[in-house]
Amino acid sequence: MTASPVPAYKRVLLKLSGEALMGEQSYGIDPAVATQIAKDIAEIQSMGVETAIVIGGGNIFRGVAASARGMDRATADYMGMLATVINALALQDALEQQRVVTRVVTAIEMRAVAEPFIRRRAIRHLEKGRVVVFGAGTGNPFFSTDTAAALRAMEIKADVILKATKVDGIYDADPMIEPGATRFDRISYLQVLEQGLQVMDATAISLCMDNRLPIVVFNLRTPGNIKRAIVGEPIGSLVTV
C-alpha cells in the first residue's frame, strides 16, 4: 500500500473564474462542472489541506463589460459582486453534496444567505476543516475578484494562490489564438507586470509581490489537477520572486 502524498501547502486560496462554472455553456452554471470541481476540492480537503475559495461572477454578469456599454461603473461592479454570491452558493451546494462542510462568507452583508466577512471567524472555519467560499469580491467597486483573491489570501495567511484557468499555465501570447505561444514554467512577478501578461490584474500581482505570495496558474479542466498542484507536482506555471 503506497503512502498518500504529503501536501506541499497547508492552507491555500483557490481562485476560480465565474466562467469555470459554465462548462461548455455560454451562460450560467453547469451542475456537472460544479460537481467535478467539488470532487477535486473534497480530495484535497481529505488530505488535511485548509481550502479557501474566491470565485468570480463573469458567467452571470461582468461589471467591466457593462460599464463599457454605458452603465455606471460602480453600479455595474456591485451587480457583478452579487453574481459572485450566486456562484458561491452554487459551489457550496456542490461541496456539501460531497459531504464537505462549507461556509459562504461575503464582503457585502446579506445575512439570510451567508456570513459577513470577519477575518478571525473565517480563519477559525479553516482551522476546523471547513471550506470557506469568499463572495462579493472585496466589497468595493473598481477592484477585481483577482485582487479580492490576493487580499483574502494575505488576510488568512495562505501559503499560495492557486489560479485555476482554461489553459495549462502562463504563455507569452494567448495560446488559443497563437498556437506557437511559449509557456513559462516559472516567472517573476516583475516579468508578469513588465510584459503585461494576463495572469491576474496588476493590482493583484503587485499585492502578491509585496507579500511574496506565490501564484500557481494551472488548467482546472483536467480532473485531479488541484491535487497535483497541492502536492507540488510541476503543473502549470509558478509566479514567484
Image (spheres, rainbow, N blue to C red):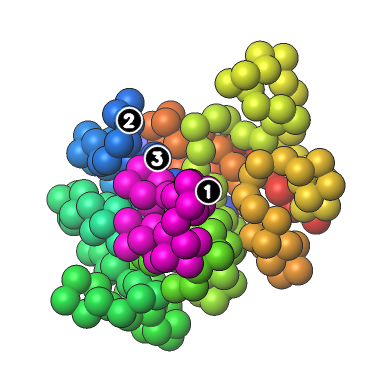
- Considering the numbered disc 3 on the image, is that residue within a helix, a strand or a loop? helix
159, 108: nearer the viewer: 108
Residue 232 in the figure: left or right of residue 48: right
- Considering the numbered disc 1 on the image, is that residue within a helix, a strand or a loop? helix
Residue 62: percent from the left, percent from the top? Answer: 43, 49
Circle 3 packing at 10 Å, graded few (<14), some (14-19), many (20+), is many
View extreme (front): residue = 70
> Which residue appears at 67% of the width and 62% of the height?
203
Could you say which quadrant of the image residue 210 lies in? bottom right
> Earlier along the polypeptide chain: callout 3 or callout 2?
3
Residue 90 in the figure: left or right of residue 43: left
Mark 3 or 2: in front is 2
> Which residue appears at 57% of the width and 30% of the height?
168
Residue 124: percent from the left, percent from the top? Answer: 37, 80
Circle 2 packing at 10 Å, graded few (<14), some (14-19), many (20+), is few
State the residue position of label 1: 68
> Earlier along the polypeptide chain: callout 1 or callout 3?
3
Residue 46: percent from the left, percent from the top? Answer: 33, 54
The disc at residue 26 is 2
Range of residues picked out in magenta: 56-83
> Earlier along the polypeptide chain: callout 2 or callout 1?
2
- Residue type, label 1: Ala
- Considering the numbered disc 2 on the image, is that residue within a helix, a strand or a loop? loop
Mark 3–mark 2 CB contact (< 8 Å)? no
- In the rendered image, residue 87 lying in the magenta stretch gets the answer no
State the residue position of label 3: 19
